[in-house]
Image (cartoon, helix red, strand yellow):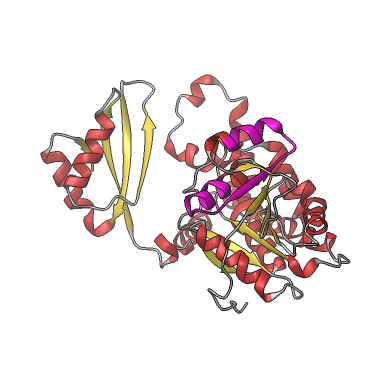
């Protein structure tokens, strides 16, 4: 999809955020960081009070005339709240966007709305297993892809204003049609979440001595399964068509895995595993660029105050850029195993530098 010219429309505010949960409050904080006036509304007085107290904005009043309305409510309510926002802003001409994780459904709900030209869908690919305004941060969207999904009747100035919001919040615009977006998030978010939940469910009733063997691998695979079941149930249901297509592909692959394991067919297993490895390499690298070869450096860290900070300071002193960091606590010993992910070409230098400073590493 072609991108509109950037910079033709200025976002000066106010910005109204409808829904003061994690995403809504984070958008408020990011806009306030940029000096934009933000007004908040939410059916939860507690969320509204918390988000306002964090500095994400102030409660909306009848006198406020927002330039842009951002709808950040659960998927089941997106269509009706977007329509209500268009109705309420008919006299001001405010642009309306939303940050929901499914785009085709809400757009269909607006098919006959006379003000639909002022609506442009969007979706930041940022979030957390946690929810609510207390988890919000102004930096949530920095450097993260943020889909912008205009429909054929979207006004050009409305599209440009939503792009301004994305850039102001630190996001990286990605242009998709609503249908393309829903297929993309089914592949990169919704189906992975379902599969993580299936794996995590195998742990719920596992014997304690089995769970004692849990390592970082199972934590990585199951992390997203900790998300709110009610919310993700709404998301998957709203994107059922695209999710079903991909689940059919996964089912076919799973049947091949079951067959290969049953026949002890190592060649077929290795082919399937190689496809998985190729998939991990297809994920874009830092700042959306091509993936670069990475290597993990493992360091044993005593589990008491100040040691992690000392490790990070020593890593900085080594002049090696740390791309990622994870901590695996050892339940049997008073140490943690810290994984520092660095460019492959710099791993040996980091290992030598840390070992020279007394750190115990694993090679």
The boundaries of the magenta stretch are 26-52
Could you tell me residue 167's position as x and y percent?
51, 63
**What residue appears at the point 58 percent right and 52 percent down from the top-left corner?**
260
Using the image as rendered, state which of residue 144 and residue 336 is in the foreground.
144
Of residues 117 and 249, which is closer to you in this image?
117
Q: In this view of the protein, can residue 317 be seen by the observer? A: yes
In the rendered image of this protein, does residue 284 appear above or below residue 352? Answer: below
**Image quarter in which the C terminus is found:** top left
Going by the picture, which residue comes out furthest to the left?
A: 356
Q: Using residue 285 as the reference point, say whether residue 135 is left or right of it.
A: right
Question: Percent from the top left, x then y, of residue 137?
Answer: 50, 43
- Front residue of this view, candidates 265 and 80: 80
Residue 27: say if magenta: yes
Residue 267 is situated, as x and y percent measured from the top left of the image, at 49, 58
Q: Is residue 188 magenta?
A: no
Residue 226 at least partly seen: no
Relative depth, front residue between 26 and 314: 26
Q: Quadrant of residue 339?
A: top left
Q: Residue furthest front?
A: 63
- Left or right of 11: which side holds 18? right
**Does 335 appear above or below 124?**
above
Whether 129 is drawn above or below 33: the answer is above
Residue appearing at x 63%, y 57% in the figure: 123
At 43% from the left edge and 37% from the top edge, which residue is drawn?
216
Give x and y (percent) for residue 228: 65, 37
């Amino acid at each position: 999809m072609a991108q509109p010219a950037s910079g033709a429309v200025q976002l000066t505010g106010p910005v109204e955020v409808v829904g003061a949960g994690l995403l809504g409050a984070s958008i408020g904080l990011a806009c306030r960081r940029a000096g934009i006036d933000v007004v908040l509304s939410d059916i939860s007085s507690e969320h509204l009070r918390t988000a306002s107290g964090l500095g994400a904005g102030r409660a909306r009043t009848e006198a406020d005339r927002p330039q842009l309305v951002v709808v950040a409510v659960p998927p089941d309510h997106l269509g009706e709240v977007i329509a209500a926002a268009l109705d309420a802003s008919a006299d001001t001409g405010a642009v309306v966007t939303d940050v929901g994780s499914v785009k085709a459904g809400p757009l269909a709900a607006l098919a006959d709305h006379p003000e639909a030209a002022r609506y442009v869908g969007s979706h930041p690919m940022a979030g957390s297993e946690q929810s609510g305004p207390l988890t919000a941060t102004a930096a949530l969207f920095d450097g993260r892809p943020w889909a912008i999904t205009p429909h054929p009747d979207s006004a050009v100035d409305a599209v440009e204003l939503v792009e301004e919001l994305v850039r102001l919040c630190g996001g990286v615009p990605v242009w998709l049609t609503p249908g393309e977006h829903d297929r993309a998030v089914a592949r990169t978010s919704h189906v992975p979440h379902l599969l993580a939940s299936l794996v995590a469910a195998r742990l719920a009733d596992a014997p304690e001595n089995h769970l004692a063997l849990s390592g970082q691998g199972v934590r990585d695979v199951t992390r997203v399964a900790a998300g709110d079941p009610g919310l993700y149930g709404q998301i998957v249901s709203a994107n059922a068509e695209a999710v079903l297509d991909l689940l059919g592909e996964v089912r076919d692959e799973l049947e091949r895995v079951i067959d290969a394991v049953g026949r002890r067919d190592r060649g077929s297993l290795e082919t399937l595993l190689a496809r998985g490895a190729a998939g991990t390499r297809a994920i874009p690298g830092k700042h959306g660029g091509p993936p670069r070869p990475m290597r993990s450096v493992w360091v044993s860290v005593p589990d008491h105050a100040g040691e992690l900070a000392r490790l990070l300071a020593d890593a900085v002193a080594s002049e090696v850029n740390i791309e990622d960091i994870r901590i695996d606590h050892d339940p049997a010993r008073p140490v943690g195993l810290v994984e520092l992910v660095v460019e492959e070409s710099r791993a040996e230098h980091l290992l030598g530098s840390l070992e020279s400073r007394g750190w115990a590493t694993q090679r």
